[in-house]
Image (cartoon, rainbow, N blue to C red):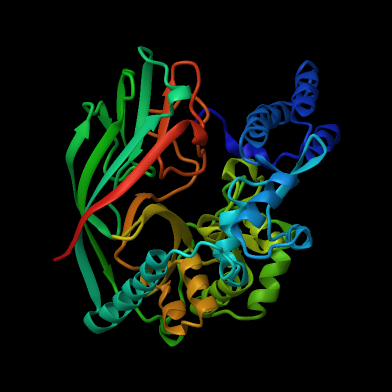
């Protein structure tokens, strides 16, 4: 990988932090350049090299809206919205913001996040889309029906076909230059077998091993005008239904997948104190995992996130701010499980249904004699907030069929390796594009994933 992200655990110099927190990203870059001219420890040098890229992301299009622009968005979309409401949402950390050159700027998806997480605001949207409301009802029915099917049948197998594309935005299109493109595809794992590439354009240069930690297909070519890179694949997906019984937990439990993995899976002092509060003197692994699941799903509010690369320790961020999206919540669960000796690991890829196909992350944990089971923290938390306790309980131990797992670990390299900064150095669900001298950022690419078909087998 272009950078060893474990060095993000190294603290930044105070003067760099002052400038960063004020939003003087250019000044922080200059301060780092000054430090780099000195004879400094190698660990600090590596940390500062990473921070230069972090500052580029933070100072890019991640926080585009001034206070006035954010207020205009809210007043133009919500009935009778007042300025003091925006101030209140900012003060209670409901609306994500930072300082940019000393002035407040809001995150690019702050409005969408508020509508998704605050029903009181969603009810005030001035243009109500009846089709969207009906689609949401159908989405909920789809998940509930899957729970009932799994409980009745004990498991489910589907054959899923997905088409994924990526292309450079016009302002990032460099026609005639050599370009390397990666698109995620399913990896062979506990749920997935028989993966077939149905179609691709242009010709695929390299397909990663079927069990690669972050599996992709790679294209290498000279970029044509308005060129789209496409892969269409099909795979068999199977999950069993399990009801975890604490009384059946084995006395001997394994200790694999219980290690730290800097910078994110770290057993920090705060997380150690939090874990004591959550599990107390409990020793049963299933009960401990359930207590952690309950904490994350009921205490950590779902929230859209800025790019993961800009966060120094994701689980601690979630536990301190009590907010985060699917991946942030999953990493908190994984870390707390590992801290108490329960093996836990990452999975991610796509959530794919007829209504929506897009990025999603979840977790696995291991308890003997059951083996590897699942936890979807964001789906569980959503069900809990809706008062759907059956579905909340289901996602402790179980998963639905609407998944495409492409990643089994975080911070892993592609095959072949990517040279420049990735859109997401932690994970890969959208795909990546790079030229010989630089990579493209999230706002320089267009990505689409479409569910072609899903049939029960």
User: Which residue is pictured at 61% across the width and 36% down the height?
Assistant: 61
User: Which residue is pictured at 50% across the width and 25% down the height?
Assistant: 420
Q: Residue furthest left?
A: 457
Left or right position of 264 against 67: left
- The x and y percentages for residue 203 are 21, 26
Point out the image quarter for the C terminus: bottom left
Q: Nearer the viewer, residue 300 or 44?
A: 300
* Residue 351 visible in image: yes
* Residue 373 visible in image: no
User: Which residue is pictured at 48% across the width and 57% down the height?
Assistant: 257
- The x and y percentages for residue 440 are 48, 28
Q: Nearer the viewer, residue 419 or 280?
A: 419
Name the image quarter holding residue 300: bottom right
Left or right position of 96 against 4: right
- The x and y percentages for residue 302 are 57, 63
Q: Nearer the viewer, residue 198 or 415?
A: 198
Q: Image height check: is 398 above or below 307?
A: below
**Number of numbered discs overlaid on the protein picture:** 0
Name the image quarter holding residue 8: top right
Left or right position of 178 against 362: left
Name the image quarter holding residue 222: top left
Q: Nearer the viewer, residue 75 or 212?
A: 75
Q: Image height check: is 17 above or below 369?
A: above
Q: Image height check: is 186 above or below 44?
A: below
Q: Residue furthest bottom?
A: 247
- The x and y percentages for residue 45 are 71, 26
């Amino acid at each position: 990988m272009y950078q060893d992200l474990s060095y993000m655990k190294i603290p930044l110099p105070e003067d760099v932090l002052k400038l960063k927190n004020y939003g003087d990203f250019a000044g922080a870059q200059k301060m780092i350049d000054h430090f780099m001219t000195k004879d400094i420890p190698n660990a600090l040098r590596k940390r500062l090299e990473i921070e230069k890229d972090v500052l580029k992301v933070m100072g890019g299009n991640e926080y585009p809206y001034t206070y006035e622009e954010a207020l205009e968005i809210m007043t133009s979309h919500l009935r009778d919205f007042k300025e003091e409401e925006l101030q209140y949402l900012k003060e209670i950390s409901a609306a994500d913001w930072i300082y940019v050159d000393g002035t407040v700027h809001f995150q690019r998806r702050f409005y969408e996040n508020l509508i998704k997480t605050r029903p009181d605001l969603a009810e005030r949207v001035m243009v109500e889309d009846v089709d969207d409301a009906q689609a949401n009802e159908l989405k909920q029915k789809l998940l509930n029906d899957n729970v009932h099917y799994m409980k009745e049948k004990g498991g489910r197998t589907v054959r899923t076909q997905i088409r994924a594309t990526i292309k450079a935005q016009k302002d990032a299109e460099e026609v005639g230059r050599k370009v390397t493109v990666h698109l995620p595809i399913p990896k062979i794992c506990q749920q997935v077998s028989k993966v077939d590439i149905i179609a691709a354009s242009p010709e695929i240069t390299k397909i990663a091993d079927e069990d690669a930690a972050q599996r992709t297909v790679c294209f290498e070519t000279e970029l044509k005008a308005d060129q789209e890179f496409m892969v269409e694949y099909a795979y068999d997906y199977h999950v069993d239904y399990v009801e975890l019984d604490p009384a059946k937990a084995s006395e001997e439990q394994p200790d694999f997948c219980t290690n730290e993995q800097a910078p994110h899976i770290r057993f920090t002092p705060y997380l150690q104190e939090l874990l004591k509060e959550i599990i107390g003197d409990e020793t049963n692994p299933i009960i401990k995992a359930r207590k952690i699941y309950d904490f994350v799903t009921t205490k950590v509010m779902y929230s859209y996130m800025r790019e993961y690369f800009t966060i120094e320790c994701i689980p601690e961020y979630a536990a301190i701010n009590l907010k985060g999206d699917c991946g942030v919540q999953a990493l908190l669960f994984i870390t707390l499980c590992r801290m108490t000796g329960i093996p836990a690991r990452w999975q991610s890829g796509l959530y794919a249904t007829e209504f929506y196909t897009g990025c999603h992350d979840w977790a696995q944990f291991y308890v003997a004699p059951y083996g590897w089971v699942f936890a979807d923290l964001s789906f569980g938390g959503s069900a809990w907030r809706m008062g759907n306790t059956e579905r909340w309980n289901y996602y402790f131990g179980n998963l639905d069929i609407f998944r495409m797992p492409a990643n089994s670990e975080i911070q892993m390299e592609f095959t072949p390796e990517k040279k420049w900064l990735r859109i997401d150095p932690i994970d890969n669900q959208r795909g990546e594009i790079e030229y010989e001298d630089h990579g493209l950022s999230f706002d320089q690419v267009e990505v689409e994933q479409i569910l072609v078909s899903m049939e029960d087998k």
